[in-house]
Amino acid sequence: MRGRGIQLLSQVLLQCYSLLQEKEVLHLVLFYESRLQDHHLVIPSVLQGLRALSMCEVLSSGLAVSVLKAIFQEVHVQSLLQLDRHTVYSIITNFMSTREEELKGLGADFTFGFIQVMDGEKDPRNLLVAFQIVRDLIAKNYALGPFVEELFEVTSCYFPIDFTPPPNDPHGIQREDLILSLRAVLASTPQFAEFLLPLLIEKLDSELQSAKLDSLQTLTACCAIYGQKELQEFLPSLWSSLRREVFQTSSEKIETECLAALHALSACLSRSVLSSDTEDLLDSFLGSILQDCRHHLCEPDMKLVWPSAKLLQAAAGASLRTYHRVTRSVLPLLLEQYTKHPQSSQRRTILEMLLGFLELQQKWRHVEEDESTLLSLQAPVCSVVFSALTDPSVQLQLVGIRALTVLGSLQGFLSSSDLKLVVDHLIRLALHEEDSQSSEAAMEAAGSLSPIYPEVFSGHMVPRLEEKLQSGRSVKGEESSHDHHSLQQRCLQALAAVSTHTSIVRETVPVLLQHLQKVQKGSKAENTEDMVSVCRSLHRVALQCQQDVESCWYFHQMVVPCLLAMAVQAAMQESTHPLLGKTLLEEEVLAAMVPVISAATTHLSPELAAQSVSHMVPLFLDGDVSFLPQNSFPCSFQPFRDGECLEAQRRLVALLMAFVCSLPRDVPSFSRQEEGLVAAMGHNCPFTATTAAKCFAGLVNKHSAGQQLDEILQLAVNRIEPALVEGPHRTQALTLLLWVTKALVLRYHPLSSCLTDKLLDLLGDAELGPAAADGFSLLMAESPDVLHKGCHADVRIMFRQRFFTDNVPKLVQGFHGAGPDVKANYLKGLSHVLNHLPKPVLVTELPTLLSLLLEALSCSDHVVQLSTLSCLQPLLLEAPQIMSLHVDTLVTKFLNLTSSPTMAVRIAALRCAHALTRLPTPVLLPYKARVIRALAKPLDDKKRLVRKEAVVARGEWFLLGSPGR
């Protein structure tokens, strides 16, 4: 009865403790303290009442100490249930956060009392709270007195944590939570060092990998607060354990943690301030490392060479002081060994080790003349690196190129003569090295070094690349022509690679544009390929200019008018002399120009973009060519006028699309070109119609809401609706419908649902149905050239989920009501939507859609089959419980499709058969023999990629149900 009475009082106090007055709290505290001496059945309710009182702000001074003393004296905490023990920890936590000075007045008695409370705790929920209390004891400088070792023992007994959460644990406590919480305690004070370090060494010598990992990570954490005094006694043992683990372990994780611990130890010793009468522990510690590892570097073919190098690099990277101490001993040795070992494989190993030490120097970004070993070895280091660049071994060349990049990044290391030699080597490797790996690596290195030495690259490398580029145009002979064509391609790539600084861009861009003009005037068959290559190089330059305002505007002013002038010239020549300028108007070339103009426009400021708009729009609407270079054209430029002779000019709408669809959203929109674009969409050329539709969609997507936008959209709808019903332009009308719908879906415009309904209706059209179904992929997928965030399009978050919610029920309903000849269109549209939906969303909707997906596998259209398979494969991995309900149908369908006439479908079906093995084993075992027999047939498939997938899938089915699977 007493217990029930106290329980009621405690429950009331937990609800209203904030309303109590000081005298009431005093009276209640005295009452509850006396009740702690009552029968053990009453104690849990008493503790709940004390917890409520511990949260009172009006608690009188001295009462917190009185309560805790009473608990320490009267309550045997570890004999209580988990919840009651948690209550005690909560009372202590509350008092520590509000009555810190009072508790500190208890001195070491408070620490001792808490040790008694915690001793023997086993529940992970309570341990998390107890560990936090210990951290606060140490962090807030509570007196530990003579109880340091006891406090360590009461916490370290849990190290290393061995805890596996039970299945479906509602508390969500993970092993990692306990590990991190305990580590924070053990690594919270140097006072634990004399007890902790022997424990860590002991655990490092154990056979348990998890214990080793935990010990190493704890050691690394401790080094952040330890000094020489704490480490001195244990350094030999720690080094011995770390060396043994790195030399002998087969675990990459343990090796990584060992190196991190050695790095932390070296950094800790580096931070210690030396007094005149103390031993320099860092020097002796590094001496031990060098003594045990240095001689292994002389054996590049032996297995200990890399472990030794990693240990030395881990120590050297800890501080500038450790770096100088280690490299003073190691770098001369590596240079000597490089000379001694003539084999390329050995030299590669030695140079890779040398590279590791060179990369460490980058952390300090400069070379100090008075201390640096590296500076004193400048000549031999450069000699070794340059010799690697001329070695026949491609792998050695690649390491040499990486080393060259690192040396170039060190300020003051390379002399002007060295830099000229660097340029010579990079040009030779980039242009003339047969192996593409070395060529690409050399170009990448040139791109890394050019912003550091812009004068050298603009003055020495660019002129030589220009010379090589021009010399290739005059070569005759089929074989020589092929070689020089390849040389030209590399020259173009190299020019783009080095264009990383404004001064270099001003040299390379004119060279690239001049070459493009020369190619346009030529008549060789490979002109298309050449022009595409130049455009790719210009695109790379544009991307590299985007982060620099000056470079970006220079590129835009130079390149965009030049490309437009060439295109306009070609279009006018096509109108009057069909054989001239045809190459530039090919779809492939125009498509290559689009990303160049787009990349040159996306990063313009609104002011500069508006300035560019004032030239571009009059060009396309009024034929104003005044801002174009070489603007004496034979006729007027009128891309939006009707007439067969203007077909070539209309193709240039692609370049307008690239420009207007990449402008920032706050640039004033244009009021006159929409009607011309809508008209251009009706032309017979699919390329022109599509690019015009994209351009119109880009404008509509960014246009601010209001009457003007509504009028523009009505203009498009008036054009689309009659054209879709009948006539020769139904396909063009569908293209316009798709792109306008996408533009509106992305921005959540109200008209998007109306246009989507039109698209759904077209799925039942015998002629346009398949194309309309494919259009759902266009609506959901990321577009590479327009309507994406990179070109400032208005793209709302979760537009795919919204589209799914609004339209999939209509697709399902349409499928059930459709005739047999068009059902496949609905399935195709549905599979496209599901394929682009985030998988977590799809999993939640799976039960209602799975039957339809399974029906789609029986469709004869291989596009539907492929899309559905690619949709089902991840679902087998992410929703095995739901999928296992249909395992019989899935097995049958997948095995049937492994014999499909389409290779892509066979591969996808085999991947799905492989993914089936992730379903619960008892569900699959009845099908094991049948699947293994069926998968024997694709092992003899005529396509290697199919055979490869069949081997993997069949192997997994063979292992199904085996022990350990």
Image (tube, rainbow, N blue to C red):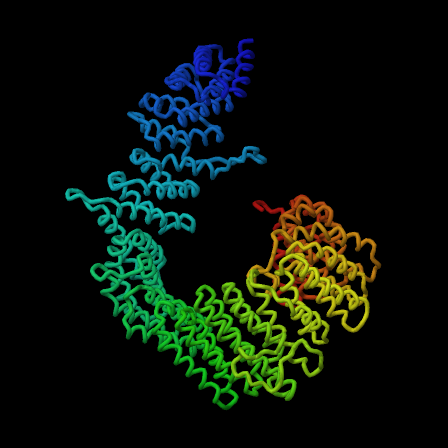
**Residue 819 lies in what quarter of the image?**
bottom right
Question: Is residue 872 positioned above or below 671 on the image?
Answer: above
Q: Position of residue 115 (x, y in %)?
A: 38, 24
Q: Position of residue 455 (x, y in %)?
A: 34, 73
Question: Is residue 521 positioned above or below 674 on the image?
Answer: below
For the residue pair 779 and 651, the one nearer the viewer reads as 651
Q: Which quadrant is home to the N terminus?
A: top right
Question: Is residue 201 positioned above or below 957 on the image?
Answer: above
Q: Is residue 896 visible?
A: no
Name of the residue lying farthest toward the top: 1
Position of residue 64 in the picture relative to residue 862 (left or right): left
**Residue at the image point whose x is 62% and y is 83% from the top:** 636
For the residue pair 86 and 618, the one nearer the viewer reads as 618
Name of the residue lying farthest toward the bottom: 476
For the residue pair 4 and 782, the one nearer the viewer reads as 782
Q: How many marks?
A: 0
Q: Is residue 329 visible?
A: yes
Question: Is residue 421 positioned above or below 184 on the image?
Answer: below
Q: Position of residue 389 (x, y in %)?
A: 36, 73
Position of residue 749 in the picture relative to residue 820 (left or right): left
Position of residue 415 in the picture relative to residue 553 (left or right): left
Position of residue 645 in the picture relative to residue 329 (left or right): right
